[in-house]
Image (cartoon, helix red, strand yellow):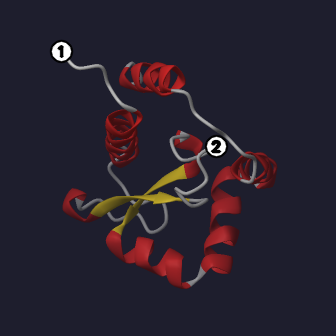
Amino acid sequence: MRKPTKHSIKAKLDKIVSLKTRALGVCQLCGNSDYSHLETSHIFSRKNLATRWDLKNCLCSCDGCHFWSHQNPLLFADKVKTILGDYEYQNLKSKAVSTKKWTLEEMIELYESLKGIE
């Protein structure tokens, strides 16, 4: 059996975060419950590794709202603040702008902990 790589674990983390987020089963922005149109919207970009796999950084959204969020980032931020509350939003924002370098072991540990979340 091959040892996992950062690349392979990164892909697994992306997938499990998406599955956990979409498991909510309803768009948190408009209420659409058509599962075939549900996606994971990251509040702060996936390029921010400190929050990329943080479930607090993800919203379940329909494809229409996800598109809208990218076209209207300021309105999206306002909507997110109403969902999370300003305090949680500011905490997440601070975490998102911090630098995080993941070790392979940390990534595997996070993946295992996410697998255990119902």
User: Disc 2 or 1, which lies upstream in sequence?
Assistant: 1
Instruction: Check the image and report above or below for 31 versus 76.
Output: above
| Residue 27 marker | none
Which residue corresponds to the image point at 41% horizontal and 26% vertical from the top-left? 111
The disc labelled 2 sits on which kind of residue?
Ala
Q: On the rendered structure, is 24 left or right of 94?
A: left
Q: Quadrant of residue 39?
A: bottom left
Instruction: Check the image and report above or below for 66 versus 4.
Output: below
Q: Camera-side residue: 23 or 93?
A: 93
Q: Camera-side residue: 28 or 109?
A: 109
The disc labelled 1 sits on which kind of residue?
Met
Which residue corresponds to the image point at 64% horizontal and 43% vertical from the top-left? 50
Quadrant location of the N terminus?
top left
Instruction: Check the image and report above or below for 35 versus 23.
Output: below
Residue 27 position, x and y percent, is: 40, 60
In terms of secondary structure, where does tag 2 sit? Answer: loop
From this viewpoint, which residue is outermost toward the top?
A: 1
Between disc 2 and disc 1, the foreground one is 1
Residue 85 position, x and y percent, is: 74, 52
Q: Residues within 10 Å of mark 1 (few under 14, many from 20)?
A: few
In terms of secondary structure, where does tag 1 sit? Answer: loop
Which residue corresponds to the image point at 81% horizontal and 48% vertical from the top-left? 87
Q: On the rendered structure, is 81 left or right of 7?
A: right
Q: Camera-side residue: 83 or 7?
A: 7
Residue at the spot of label 2: 50
Q: Residues within 10 Å of mark 2 (few under 14, many from 20)?
A: some
Residue 76 position, x and y percent, is: 61, 73
Q: How far, Cα to Cα, is label 2 from label 1?
A: 30 Å
Residue 114 position, x and y percent, is: 43, 26
| Residue 1 marker | 1
